[in-house]
Image (tube, helix red, strand yellow):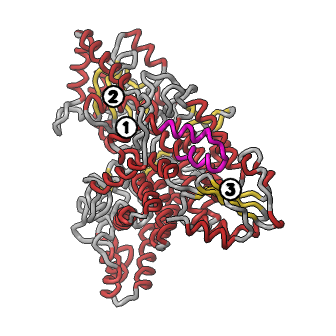
Amino acid sequence: MQTNNKPNRLITEKSPYLLQHAHNPVNWFPWGEEAFMKAKQENKPIFLSIGYSTCHWCHVMAHESFEDEEVAKILNEHYISIKVDREERPDVDSIYMKVCQMMAGHGGWPLTIFMTPDKIPFYAGTYFPKESKYGRPGLIEALEQLHKKYTTDPEHISEVTESVKQALESSAREKSDQRLTKEHADQAFQQLGRGFDFTYGGFWEAPKFPQPQNLMFLLKYYHFTGKIAALKMVESTLQNMAAGGIWDHVGFGFARYATDEKWLVPHFEKMLYDNALLLMVYTECYQITKKPFYKNIAEQIISFIQREMTSRDGAFYSAIDADTEGVEGKYYVWDGEEIFDILGEDLGDIYTTAYGITPVGNFEGKNIPNLIRSNLESVADEFDLSVSALVSQLEDARQKLLSEREKRVYPHVDDKILTSWNAMMIVALAKAGKVFQNKDYLAMAESAMQFIEEKLFDHEQLKARYRDGETKYNAYLDDYAYVAWAYLELYQATFQLEYLSKGKEQVDKMIELFWDNKQAGFFFSGKNNEKLISTDKEIYGGATPSGNSVAALVLTQMVSLTGEMNYLDKVEEMYFTFYEDIDRQASAAVFFLQSLLLTEYPTKEVVVLGDSDSWKPLVRELQEQFSPDIALLVADNPEMLKDVAPFAAEYIILNDQATIYVCENFACQQPTNDIDLALSKLKNSTV
């Protein structure tokens, strides 16, 4: 591996991705004024490379080109080279990814941008091999030709950059005079149905991503409409994914995506956000179906997160790499003989039969354990075992294999703490703690929130990233939206009013910093963020739900809990602002459509007052059922609500007993002390 003994400027950074390139022979700069000033002074174009530390093709390009002296010589002579960690600077990544999609018709990482010292791109792409191959131009060829173009034909460069600026300006959204309706949720459902794989679950063709946002929407859509097909799509997907190799059957946790339609061969990296979102889906599917399978997978996800992605301080790491010692999946795959060496002949025979382990393997001569073709009842019959005895033996085998696997060289872990992703996992753990009535899960969620409060606020300014003692970057929209969501979920799990109050505080700050007062909706970057070449306002979901989608859901829930209608006004405006985008492709913004379901279908606000011992049975039952249409506000006495939910501060406790107030469709029923009657009314009014 060609590297410099003398490090470049990235050596002082905290990002694991930037540090991976700190000994490249390329004279990398981090994103900042030093690089841009030098480019202007020397009249050099900028070579911008954006990626992240667990990105497989980022590793490939780094090894082929950025560790190569020939490539480095060209870059150092003719360019100012900048490295960006997309997970630290999603604002930079978002804008230049949009440009790449405009120019090249596609995007992805590594993201490669050629731009002027004024930060305006004139060429964009993703992975470049060192020399031309795979039908792709080589990096050396691109570097030489584009530098020549930049120096000899400045008029052409000016024409391209001007067209880029105009394209970015024209992409800015203006409010439509039309409003979203529940028919757009119906359109999203129909579009998802057309893209659904009825054999293996999931959506569209391989490579196949879990797309938990689709599944969360479908569960709510089923709840509000009763359309059983929505639930069936979710169940098929969750069951097939958990049978496939995308699910780690030895150590648990989901990989990023599968390269095939059956979910067998994963891209082996594990991301915090995928596991957080899927934990939410499995938990909610259990709420609806009460099938132990979904609870089991949810709890195994938590087991994995606790063992492999939780810091000593209770926060959550970002990702685990796909590669070990330069080989993708090496940590996770098995030789057939190796299984027998570890488990012995009898247990090995049972395990290899159940999990599809063969001498020839199913991935480059190795084996990815899976249950795609397995029927545990048939396996149990084959070995003359009961199903429960078989499951017990397979669990014994799994633990032995995990113990042996842990002796291998462990993949690289990106151990930076990202505010938005941590908040996402807090939401998931709070949901699981509430639904499964598990205090340990709640403790994990609260510990992570305490970390955010102690490490990721700087003089009341929320920050985006913490690593190795350094807190950096003013928070983006996603950070505020997800933290507010996390506070709301913690409140719904614990009913500590402090969480609701803090959530409201973050929502108000989010509106102050990010709201577009002219066209409505939230900008990705706020008043406290660096000004870039464009302001982005995203509604479509990517790997995670967009900040606007989460903000809309949070605002909708906050209205029900606090009674402050100005939050609903903001959501209503967003239904006009994002009309054109969602009308064009409703299924691309399904997370946003959850808020539409909550505003277009009947919902209920339930206020419970009095001594907690008397209302616990009611609250527990509501927590355990799937009821997104019910907002639950709980307090020992009305006085406690005067600051955060003043509408309920004047309510009274009847007969010194737990008192339940139920409001639906802007009309409130008579308060009651009869918990069974209140539950009956709530159940009868749900789908």
> Which residue type does callout 2 highlight?
Val
Q: Which residue is mark 3?
A: 633
What residue is at 57 percent from the left and 68 percent from the top? 683
- Residue at image location 34% in from the left, 36% down from the top: 110
Along the polypeptide, which appears first: circle 2 or circle 3?
2
Numbered label attached to residue 581: 1
Image coords of residue 421 (percent x, y): 51, 46
The three-letter amino acid code for the residue at tag 3 is Leu
Quarter of the view holding residue 247: bottom left
Left or right of residue 337, residue 307 in this image: right
Which of the two labelled residues, at mark 1 and mark 2, occupies the earlier sequence position?
2
Q: Which residues are magenta?
A: 553-574
What type is the residue that disc 1 sits on? Answer: Asp
Mark 1 vs mark 2: in front:
1
Q: Which residue is mark 2?
A: 99
Q: Is residue 162 above or below residue 236?
A: above
Asked if residue 270 is positioned above or below residue 170 in the image, the reply reads below
**Can the viewer see residue 22?**
no
Q: CA distance from mark 1 to mark 2?
A: 18 Å
